[in-house]
Image (spheres, rainbow, N blue to C red):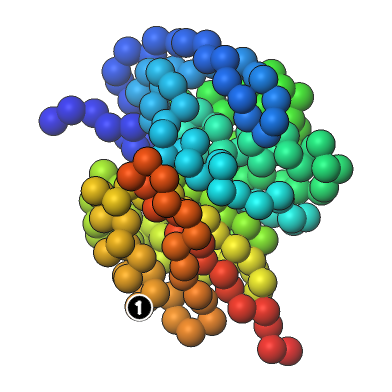
Amino acid sequence: MSEHYFTESPSSDAKQRELNLELGGHEVTVTTVGGTFSPTRLDLGTSVLLRHLPAPEPGNLLDLGCGWGPIALDAALNAKDAEVDVTVWALDVNSRSLESTAANAKRLGLDSIKAVTAEQIPADLQFTAIRSNPPIRVGKDALHDLLSTWIPRLAPGGRADLVVSKNLGADSLHRWLSETLGETFTVKRTGSSKGYRVLTIHRAQSSA
């Protein structure tokens, strides 16, 4: 069986590359490594997601499945420019992804990013925002488990944005999210570009 980017400890070639790209309105250079998601370029789905995101709100932001860090880095750069106090939790199971994200954050002077495993996130922490290009190829059951674990940890009034390829089940995932999350959540398609859907989930403000 071939090794996937959602492997905890990849054994594939750890070839390093430098990429020059735009994140958070800045031209930056980052380092990627083999055995992570899309190490040769900024993934098209991720680029679609980044174009549809709002400015970060103060609080805790979760990058769910961070890879080498583009979503986390983009959020931290935007927050730094806007002088908004955001802690970015960059979550992944892949040790190389976490190492790459941490190294890129250090390189860009972004101390607001914490590259973490699930066990390193406080159990009672809620997020004002969740952003993800989720690992569709992990399988439907594992994907549903992942999303049903983290999306409910949105704080009241919080927002999650996901990007999913239409050909990999974006519309069926939209229906599943709407049916599963409950009446305190709304799920809408807020973007569509280059074969990708952006799904936005809002959690209602507390009635208290």
Residue beneath the point at 69% across and 31% down: 25
Work out which quarter of the rendered image holds the N terminus and state it.
Answer: top left
- Secondary element at tag 1: helix
Give the residue number, with chain letter if any, for mark 1.
179
Point out residue 91 in the picture as x, y percentages from the top left corner.
52, 43
Q: Is residue 154 above or below residue 9?
A: below
Residue beneath the point at 72% across and 34% down: 77
Is residue 138 visible from the viewing direction of this image? no
Residue beneath the point at 56% across and 48% down: 52
**Please, what is the three-letter code of the amino acid marked with disc 1?**
Glu
Q: Is residue 106 above or below residue 20?
A: below
Residue beneath the point at 32% across and 71% down: 175
Q: Is residue 160 left or right of residue 86?
A: left
Is residue 44 visible from the viewing direction of this image? yes
Q: Quadrant of residue 106?
A: top right
Work out which quarter of the rendered image holds the C terminus and state it.
Answer: bottom right
Q: Is residue 86 left or right of residue 67?
A: right
Please state which of residues 144 and 28 is positioned toward the viewer in this rendering. 28
Point out residue 139 in the picture as x, y percentages from the top left corner.
23, 51
